[in-house]
Amino acid sequence: MDYKDLANLIFPDIKDISYYEEKYPKRNLKEGAIVTRFAPSPTGFVHIGGLYQSLIARKLANQTEGVFFLRIEDTDQKREVENGVIDIVNSLKNFGLEPDEGMISETEEKGSYGPYRQSKRKEIYQSYAKYLISQGKAYPCFCSPEEIEETREKQEAAKIRPGYYSVWAKCRNITVEEAIEKIKNGEKYIIRFKSPGREDRKIKHHDVIKGNVTFPENDQDIVIIKADGLPTYHFAHAVDDHLMGTTHVIRGDEWLSSVPLHLQLFQELGFKAPKYAHIAPIMKNDNGNKRKLSKRKDPEAAVSYYDEQGIPKEAVKEYLLNIANSNFENWRKQNKEKGIEEFELQLNKMSVSGALFDMVKLYDVGKTVISMFSAEEVYNNALNWAKKYDKELEEILQDKEYALKVFGIERGNKKPRKDIAKWSDVKENISYMYDEIFENQEKSYPYQAINEKEDIRKILEEYIKIYDENDDKQTWFDKIKELSGKLGYAKEVKEFKANPEMYKAHVGDVSTVLRVALTMRTNTPDMYEIMKILGKEKIEKRFKKAIENL
């Protein structure tokens, strides 16, 4: 009896690997095309780090006319959560990172290299496991979980490296005859890889991001097929990345220590290994200490958080590219109008240490991104967000024509307004343009430099007499200057600065009184445009209300 008999006994009706090698031929892509994948487990929400990996993987595939696919690694079915797959699919879709191939819903997929759910590829893995057994490179292990635990306790007590290797690998040297007899007797078993490695030997590996790295060889006889017939992650990813033609594996650097094992699996299976690019984790500043963004502690770790807050997907992607390549910021300054797809991402320019995730910086990016949107785009995005998260905002946006005027203030010019960082800011930023919100607000008028009641009353009463909706902007401002002079304020700020004792205040302070009476704010976009949209009747009404509140 030989290894082939053992392989046939364990997997009697499994196809030969030649069937799958033919079924999944080498991809017909141009030279240098990169094939990448996002391969999450459906075990919880999508982490921002997963989105970061997907953005990089998608970008590299696009840049080289390659392929980006979505594979679901669901062989650990105990940990799977309900709707886990659709959450992953929707998260990619929401950020415009749809895959070229792979899962497109909980059950549907597209592409010729599927199934793209590992739980549906059981026979494929068993075919390659059978091949390894027939080559004497894998074997059945009959150790019970209790025996494995006992071994681990002995290793810990003796302060030696834990694991199933060397003399601790009890079933490694069982003869074929013994193994066949145990199987025929109904003994339970799993399949282990027979590692050819020795821990006292080193391997050198070139990581696309980390550069040259040296590791001890893998000598662990890892499990490749579990008791339920499904593979472990390590084995499944090697088989899948080979058959699906993955050229570059983009993943978090917590997987770096698995490289010796993964390269060994590729070698023993007779596959060409992909290139590995291990991305440094996204970090958070926690009271001066850097730590990884945590699923438990940090709401911003979940991709869903960005949708809830209404942070534009474009801003999130821009910010992540900024983390990925430090030259992105300069590129963006020089190419304000270009889409991010025109930026060339380079893996070798990625940082080897974790980048800090800075929400303040992300909000700044959000402000810049939204400032480039048209009024129509701002309206559509704000309305879509409001439909999900803010009924009051949805209600006030029903008058689209008026809303477009509001969103059009200071938009489309050389220095567009940058007051909105996220869609959840919109209501707060435009509430003073809507009487139904403005009139129900607690009345507070921060007048600043001019705060004598009589002075404020006089400015408001005199101004409404001279306001004309038909004035152009220059005429409008000239009238404020004239009124300032008439009431004893400097018409120019520089005049006031030169002779402060001659004036009560200056034209800027008079403008502040008008602005505060109108909006209850000291800082708003262009007041000329605000007044034109509100109209004289509303301005007068608000000034009267402000006078009543003096």
Image (spheres, helix red, strand yellow):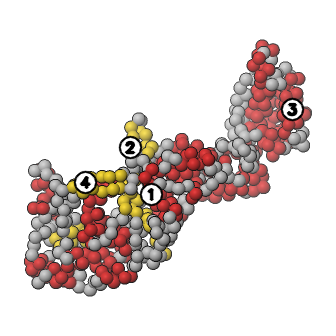
> Could you tell me how far apart the alpha carbons at marks 3 and 2 are, in whole angstroms?
56 Å
Rendered location of residue 529, percent (x, y): 79, 43
> Could you tell me how far apart the alpha carbons at marks 4 and 2 are, in whole angstroms?
25 Å
| Mark 1 neighbour class, 10 Å CA radius: few under 14, some 14 to 19, many 20 or more | many
The residue type indicated by label 3 comes to Asp
N-terminal of the two: label 3 or label 4? 4
Q: Secondary structure at mark 4?
A: strand
For image coordinates 21% across by 58% down, the residue present is 217
N-terminal of the two: label 1 or label 4? 1
Q: Where residue 53 is drawn, which disc sits there?
A: 1
> Could you tell me how far apart the alpha carbons at marks 2 and 1 are, in whole angstroms?
19 Å
| Quadrant of the image occupied by residue 137 | bottom left
The residue type indicated by label 2 comes to Arg
Which residue matches tag 2?
Answer: 291
For image coordinates 58% across by 43% down, the residue present is 364
Q: Secondary structure at mark 3?
A: helix
> Could you tell me how far apart the alpha carbons at marks 3 and 4 are, in whole angstroms?
75 Å
Kindly give the residue lying farthest to the front in the view shown: 31
Look at the image and tell me whether residue 329 can be seen: yes
Which residue matches tag 4?
Answer: 215
> Could you tell me how far apart the alpha carbons at marks 1 and 4 are, in whole angstroms?
24 Å
Q: In the picture provided, is 355 more to the left or to the right than 125? A: right
Which residue matches tag 3?
Answer: 478
| Mark 3 neighbour class, 10 Å CA radius: few under 14, some 14 to 19, many 20 or more | few
Rendered location of residue 131, percent (x, y): 24, 78
Q: How many marks?
A: 4
